Image: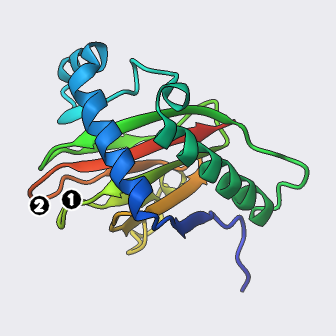
C-alpha cells in the first residue's frame, strides 16, 4: 500500500520570550483601542476580540508584529519548499490578531484565495481548546465506514506556529480553561 495526496501540517517553535511579551501587549492594546474590531466581534458573536475585519495594516502599525511577519515569511518559504512548490515564494496577504475568551470557539472554515494559512500562539492558558483539522476526504466518503482519524486535534501552547494549505478545513474547539488565548492568524498568497 502507498499513500496518495498527503496533507501537510507545518509545526515550528518561536520561543522568543521578549517577542511573545511584546505581541501579547500589542494584542491587548488593539483589543482595547480598535472600536471597529470590537463592534465586528460583538455583531458576529466572537467571544473576545479579533482584528480580522477592521485592521489590515498591523505590520506597519506595530514593530513586534512587523518582526513576527519576517519570521512567518521565512517559515512559509520553508513550508512551500517542503511541500514541493518549487519556485513559489509565498507572500503575506493578510494577518489579524485574536483574543479568545474562556469557552470561546470558532466554527469550521477554510481560507479562500490563499495558499498557506496559519496561526501563531502568543499566550495559551491551560485548557484553551484545540485547533481541529478535518480530513479533506470527509465530504466525499459517501457510504464509507466512519474512521477514527477523520479529525486531528493539536493542543496549542505559547510559541507554537502552525501552517497548512488554506483549503484544509479547521476549527477552534471551545476550551474549558480560564483566561484569554492570544493568537495571530494569517494567510499567504
Residue 27 in the image, given as x and y percentages of width and height = 32, 38
| Residue annotated with mark 1 | 128
Left or right of 13: which side holds 184? left
Question: In the rendered view, would you say 27 is above or below 84?
Answer: above
Q: Secondary structure at mark 1?
A: loop
Q: Using the image, tell me which numbered label, if any, was put on residue 3.
A: none
Q: Are marks 2 and 1 in contact (CB under 8 Å)?
A: yes
Pick the front one: 101 or 149: 101
What is the quadrant of residue 41 in the picture? top left
Tell me how the rendering is colored: rainbow
- Residue at point 48% right, 25% down? 61
Give residue 60's quadrant in the image.
Answer: top right
For marks 2 and 1 on the same chain, the one whose residue lies earlier in the sequence: 1
Tell me how many marks there are.
2
**148 and 131: which is toward the camera:** 131
Q: Position of residue 127 (x, y in %)?
A: 17, 65
Answer above or below: position of 2 versus 168. below
Residue 135 visible within the image: no
Q: Is residue 9 left or right of residue 73?
A: left
Residue at (16% x, 44% y) in the render: 101
Depicted 8 relative to depicted 119: above or below: below
What crowding class fits label 1: few (fewer than 14 Cα within 10 Å), some (14-19), or many (20 or more)?
many
Amino acid at each position: 500500500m502507498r499513500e496518495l495526496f498527503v496533507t501537510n501540517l507545518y509545526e515550528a517553535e518561536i520561543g522568543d520570550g521578549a517577542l511573545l511579551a511584546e505581541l501579547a501587549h500589542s494584542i491587548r492594546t488593539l483589543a482595547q483601542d480598535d472600536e471597529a474590531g470590537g463592534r465586528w466581534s460583538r455583531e458576529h458573536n466572537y467571544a473576545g476580540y479579533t482584528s480580522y475585519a477592521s485592521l489590515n495594516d498591523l505590520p506597519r502599525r506595530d514593530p513586534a508584529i512587523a518582526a513576527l511577519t519576517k519570521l512567518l515569511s521565512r517559515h512559509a518559504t520553508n513550508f512551500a519548499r517542503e511541500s514541493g512548490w518549487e519556485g513559489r515564494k509565498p507572500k503575506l496577504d493578510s494577518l489579524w490578531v485574536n483574543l479568545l475568551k474562556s469557552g470561546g470557539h470558532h466554527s469550521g472554515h477554510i481560507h479562500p484565495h490563499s495558499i498557506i494559512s496559519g496561526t501563531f500562539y502568543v499566550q495559551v492558558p491551560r485548557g484553551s481548546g484545540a485547533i481541529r483539522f478535518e480530513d479533506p476526504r470527509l465530504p466525499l466518503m459517501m457510504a464509507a465506514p466512519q474512521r477514527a482519524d477523520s479529525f486531528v486535534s493539536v493542543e496549542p501552547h505559547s510559541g507554537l506556529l502552525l501552517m497548512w494549505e488554506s483549503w484544509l478545513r479547521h476549527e477552534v474547539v471551545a476550551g474549558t480553561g480560564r483566561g484569554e488565548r492570544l493568537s495571530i492568524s494569517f494567510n499567504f498568497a
